[in-house]
Amino acid sequence: MNNGFTLWFTGLPCSGKTTVSEVVAQELLDRGLKVEILDGDVVRQGLSKELGFSKEDRDIHIRRIGFVSKLLSRNGVAVLAAFVSPYRVIRDELRQEIENFVEVYVKCPVEVCIERDVKGMYKKALAGEIKNFTGISDPYEEPENPEVVIETDKETTEESAQKVLETLETLGYIPKAADVTYSEEEEEKIKQRLKALGYL
């Protein structure tokens, strides 16, 4: 199973996209996949430094991330992209462009997102200091047919991650956890690591 895929996490700011994607990424690494996380500010600095937050600029930014995801996934990489990506038409465009595209809707009420917001972005948006802020002064269009819906206000991070992994297994993109086999060399490395940690 060397087929790459793109796991696209979409949802309101502070809905838990990054948190869940990091847990999923670690599990995929543990199962021997090549993994790349594309997320937030780092990607914006690298790909779209010159862009602002107007609808047009956001669309360009998301298309660029989609292009990178397409290149990586067609070369056997499991790509985890975690972006608000509020507009349905652009996400649907990515679905057409990227083979093995899996949309994960990270569903969370805006009230809960506001409570979780350690950077105070919602507060600034509510005060009118940030324009075009998704969920406050700009719309978020929910996915109509995502492959996975996780509800981060009702589930633990692990439960949400498990839903995503089970979907990937069902779609045949990753081996089931029980099917993962290790070479003798890999087994030896794991044993040495466990010894070093004092488990053996």
Image: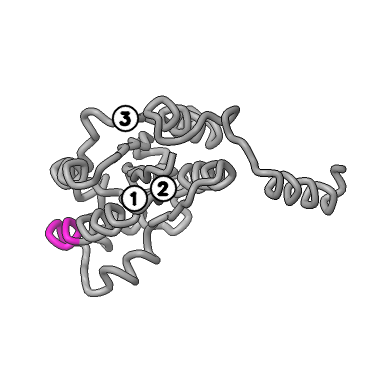
Residue 178 lies, with reference to residue 14, above or below; the image says: above
Q: Is 158 or 31 nearer to us in this picture?
A: 31
Q: Which residue lies furthest to the front in this view?
A: 184
Mark closest to the chain's N terminus, 1 or 3: 1
Q: What stretch is highlighted in magenta?
A: 54-60
Q: Residue at x 34, y 45 (%)?
A: 6
**Badge 1 vs badge 2, beta-carbon distance below 8 Å:** yes
Between 32 and 84, the residue placed more toward the observer is: 32
Point out which mark residue 78 bears: 2
Under tag 3, what secondary structure? Answer: loop
Residue that badge 3 annotates:
147
Residue behind mark 1: 73
What secondary structure predominates along the stretch shown in magenta? Answer: helix
Percent x, y of residue 2: 42, 44
Residue depicted at 33% across the width and 44% down the height: 8
Q: Helix, strand or loop at disc 1?
A: helix
Three-letter code, disc 3: Glu
Residue 128, given in percent of the width and then of the height, sits at 25, 59
Figure label count:
3
Name the secondary structure under disc 2: strand
